[in-house]
Image (spheres, grey):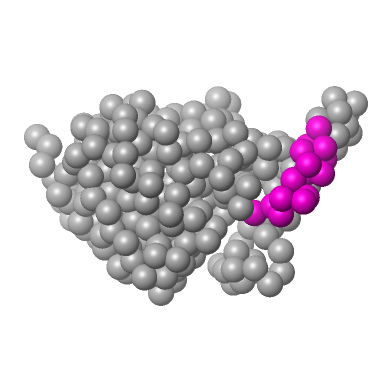
Amino acid sequence: MREDTTFTVSGLALSGWIYTPDQGQGPYPVIVMSHGFGAIKEMSLDQTAEIFCQAGYVVVVYDHRNTGLSAGEPRGELDPWQQINDMRDVITLASLLPQVDPQRIGLWGTSYSGGHVLVVAAVDRRVKCVVSQAPTVSGYKNTLRSIPADKFDAFLEEIAQDRINRAKGLAPKVVPISTEGSESYAWSIVAGKGTAYVNAVTLRTRDFRMGYEPGIYIPRIAPTPLLMILASHDTRCPTDDQLAAYSTAHEPRKLHLFKGGHYDPYSIRLKETAGASRDWFDTHLGRLD
């Protein structure tokens, strides 16, 4: 049911999986999936993909460049706009699979990639249905909430110094994705055990995030159907910012608000959230001729 593969985008090999249903010959609708900020596909995306595949979808799952088993340097450098461009290339490659119906493409993203899918669905009409789970909607607001006000100027100075050092040919500065004792660390240390996950990104990654505002694309997504799956107590990508962004969406749209935090869809809320996603894809991809 699952095939290991690589997707070559801009000459770079992205590590991926292709799930194909075992019923009939197709062509099947396809769902393209990717993970969040520094996370990799082995961190629960296989469980969500299996639910989609069992419902009759080809599922394409991949790791972003510079992470996991995907190629790319510097390791741990996450440029959201590069990831968005890669996502559109993976959509192209998925549409060319012989078992896929290229007129029925669904897109699913979570956390950081939950923001990416908002942008892609707004600008790429090949996407016929989109699910954004616990998304980043404002990298700037996320940054402000994660850094104490009295340390923000020092953060900016550190970013500027890193640019100077890199211009001199020095190695990029690397910082942790999460620190011990945090909710993010508690999840990743368990979910990433035994995988290629690394709890580190370049400092420039945080600079990129600060300028990333995917939420502003939400009003442009319609008429593509949009489902947003949000946690009632998300502190990583704050719920109030997500709800405000969702309010700008046009029909067809749907909000699934589950009780819990940012990381619960990968564990105790996985069946609920994956089921809500599957039902949304069933409703909208299944209506196409």
The residue depicted at 37 percent of the width and 58 percent of the height is: 230
Residue 201 position in % (x across, y down): 70, 47
For the residue pair 207 and 147, the one nearer the viewer reads as 147
Q: As drawn, is 188 to the left or to the right of 285? A: right
The residue depicted at 50 percent of the width and 36 percent of the height is: 213
**Main SS type for the magenta part?**
helix
Residue 68 position in % (x across, y down): 61, 50
Q: Is residue 253 visible?
A: yes
Q: Relative to residue 48, is residue 6 depicted above or below?
A: above
Q: Quadrant of residue 46?
A: bottom left
The residue depicted at 72 percent of the width and 37 percent of the height is: 204
Q: Relative to residue 112, is residue 190 depicted above or below?
A: below
For the residue pair 2 and 260, the one nearer the viewer reads as 260
Question: What count of labels does the image hold?
Answer: 0
Q: Is residue 16 visible?
A: no
For the residue pair 7 and 223, the one nearer the viewer reads as 223
Q: As drawn, is 245 to the left or to the right of 225? A: right
Magenta region includes residue 23: no
Residue 269 position in % (x across, y down): 37, 70
The residue depicted at 63 percent of the width and 47 percent of the height is: 144
Magenta region includes residue 158: yes
Question: Which image quarter holds the C terminus?
Answer: top left
- Which contiguous range is marked in magenta? 146-160
